[in-house]
Image (tube, rainbow, N blue to C red):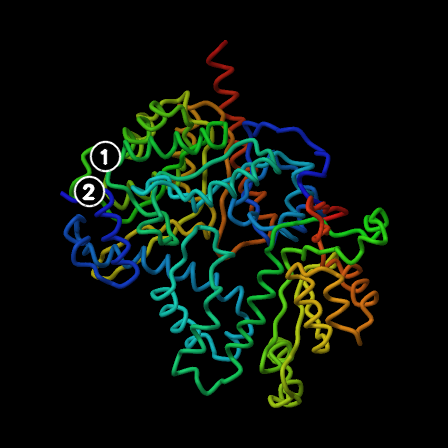
Amino acid sequence: MSSSSTPKAWATAPIPATAGIGLRFCHHQPVLDERPSVGWLEVHTENYMGGGRPLAYLDAIRRDYPVSLHGVGLSLGSAEGPDRVHLERIKRLVERIEPGLISEHLSWSMTGGVYVADLLPLPMTEEALAVMCRNVAHVQEHLGRPILVENPSSYLRYRHSPIPEWEFLAAVARHTGCSILCDVNNIFVSACNHGFDAHRYLRALPPESVSEIHLAGHTLKDLGDGRKIRIDDHGARVCRDVWHLYDEAVALFGPVPTLIEWDTDLPPLAVLLDEAAMAERRLNAARGAGNADAR
Amino acid sequence: MPTLDELQRAFGASLRFGEDGTIAEAIIGGGIAPEERLRIYRNTAQSVLADSLRLAYRAVERLVGRNFFDMAAARFMRECPPRTGYLNDYGDAFADFLAALPSAAELVYLPDVARFEWALSIAANAPDAPVLDIAMLADVEKEQHEALCFMPHPSLRLLRLGFPADEIAGAVLSGSERAMAAIDLSSGPAWLVVHRGPDGVEARRLDPQAWRFAARLHAGETLGSLIDSFPDLDIARALAEQVGRGCLSGFWLGSTSESLRCSGGAA
């Protein structure tokens, strides 16, 4: 059915402060068949920019679940600005799906009109901050609503990068009114790779701006000669250290929508639901602790 | 200190062409060389694009093997990089690239198999659009029938291929040696229509005359002109088949000064 001729079976549903899972193609049918008890679902925006079967699945799933759109291709940090055609495609999908949240990354992927298929690190400079703020503001104006910006994992730092990432991200939120998608696994990965304090990162984020948390697994890659680097491959369960960091994040920010991401070596749906249940228990524990404090 | 634009261009040149020199100077080593750090990003970017091509060109990969496919994909990425983050659009030039690749010259049918698979990919990912309901034509006055022009569904592609690429792709993906052995490479051109109907993507062969009619119909030629050009073709039947299979999205009256456009029905 075309979007223009189809009466909507839903209104924009806010994303609840519960655990959700990242929905990938292989889980479309299981979700429709099993209707699992999960608070919400998040999909990669780019996977639904065409028509046909993927979009039909998303329409069907959206009738029963709040959905968040999480993009990877807009290149918010590009000096040449975000891809206008890509932004228009996002807008069409937003109008059709009416997602509870729309998010992208604190990174860049376009240069010289060429798309590089990864989330590349920004130098944390005043110039990059101005570019990022200009691009986020442009996207928000075009979509007519605020977006969330996520901190990516990184494997390198620039010699000239004087602003700490946590200050940079907070400044983007302050200047543009966007929210922060705090990826706790990414903070852990980058903190290990670059030797900064993950706890300090969390404490520096403005709690009122954090509207979503991401959790995922990562791997420790051996580069030889005793050198190791953590790679954010979204291919395993959330590790214990990241769960502990998550507990700290929830204590700082309060219960916020929390997503389990898994993108490589995808397991059965039940494994994702199990991870989501773990996040839910921790959210509930934080709620209980908050209530006890209030008394 | 480079500007952001200079830094991003240098980073892009590193990932695409392996020109690490300029960007490496801007990166902290700290026990892991900048070139090694850049390689992590390069590997991810290349594997994402290779997987995207692999998804569209499954039969091509089976025909050449994974190693050759990855080599060809890596060269293709350097020569024809993506221009957007929507990767379902990436790979339209792969068939022509393979046709010009000397190491693939022995597989003379390979570019046609790629063209066929790209049409399938377009059909699968094309935007949703209305499907013309034959009942909507009932309101058109009989004397206006010859002015009718038709809009094809955006998923539709017509292919005239020198080799039986549809049979080759089907056989290689089925893994059937017998089906592969039965293919006659000299069986003449394959006249194909590929589109996404209500039951999914379908590819069919047409006879040459029906294919030429469909090509001109989808190009927006008036029905009157088509009737004149194809005196031996049962136009009513050919048009009914186009409508019945969901190949058309709408119509307009082409020869009137105020063209009436109409699209509708179910997408």
Which chain is indicated by disc 1?
A
Q: Position of residue B20 (x, y in %)?
A: 20, 59
Q: Residue at x 22, y 35 (%)?
A: A125
Q: Nearer the viewer, residue B244 or A272?
A: B244
The 10 Å Cα crowd at callout 2, few under 14, some 14 to 19, many 20 or more, is few
User: Disc 2 sits on a residue from what chain?
Assistant: B
For the residues marked 1 and 2, what is the alpha-carbon distance in whole angstroms?
Answer: 8 Å
Callout 1 touching callout 2 (CB < 8 Å): yes
Query: Residue A170 appears at what percent x and percent y?
Result: 32, 27
Q: Which residue is mark 1?
A: A127
Residue B250 appears in the picture as rendered:
no
In the rendered image, residues at marks 1 and 2 fall on the same chain: no
Residue A269 at x, y = what percent? 60, 49
State the image quarter where residue A194 is shown.
top left
- Residue furthest to the front: B257
Q: Specify the label residue A236 is tagged with.
A: none
Residue at 50% across / 48% down in the picture?
A262
The single residue placed furthest to the top in the displayed view is A295
Q: Which residue is mark 2?
A: B3
Left/right placement of residue B194 relative to residue A174 reads right
Residue A123 seen anywhere in this rendered image of the structure = yes
At 84% from the left edge and 49% from the top edge, which residue is drawn?
Answer: B141
Q: Amino acid at mark 2?
A: Thr
